[in-house]
Amino acid sequence: MEIPEGKAKAFLFKLGSLGRRLFVYLEDDDNTWSKAALVYKDKNGKKKILQKTTYPFEFTVDANIKNAVNFSLELTGIDGKITKSKTYQLGK
């Protein structure tokens, strides 16, 4: 999946009986963004936020094997302006 904010890409990997992983990365670097956050719901449906303040801006998280994964990005520009993506969904 392509996400316009941060020129990001998102993938959902199946690891057999080990489960699934959501991997999200930004092509944009620290010349554009000072912070990137992945907002998602974990395997138990609890909201989680992962933040990175250094490049590369990439995230890997456990994903529920049976349900879709909902997530969004919150990016802070080097000018301090916050950009939020819409909520995306991968899997089913």
Image (cartoon, rainbow, N blue to C red):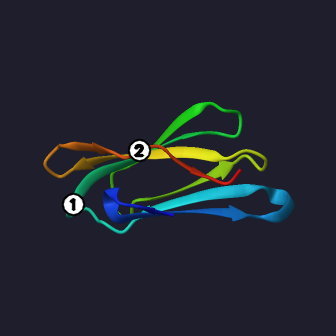
Could you tell me which secondary element the residue under label 2 belongs to?
loop
**For residue 54, above or below residue 44:** below
Decide if residue 87 is on the left or right side of residue 69: left
* Residue 80 locus on image (x, y percent): 17, 43
* Residue 61 locus on image (x, y percent): 61, 51
Residue drawn 54% across the image and 41% down it: 40
Q: Residues within 10 Å of mark 2 (few under 14, many from 20)?
A: few
Decide if residue 2 is on the left or right side of residue 89: left
* Label 2 vs 1, first from the N-terminus: 1
Decide if residue 84 is on the left or right side of residue 62: left
Residue drawn 73% across the image and 46% down it: 64
Residue drawn 71% across the image and 50% down it: 92
Determine which residue is flagged by label 1. Answer: 32
Could you tell me which secondary element the residue under label 1 belongs to?
loop
Decide if residue 15 is on the left or right side of residue 58: right
Query: 33 or 3: which is nearer to us?
Result: 3
Determine which residue is flagged by label 2. Answer: 86
* Residue 20 locus on image (x, y percent): 72, 57
Separation of residues labelled 2 and 1 (CA atoms):
19 Å
Quarter of the image holding residue 90? bottom right
Q: Amino acid at mark 1?
A: Thr
Q: Residues within 10 Å of mark 1 (few under 14, many from 20)?
A: few
Q: Contact (CB < 8 A) between labels 2 and 1?
A: no
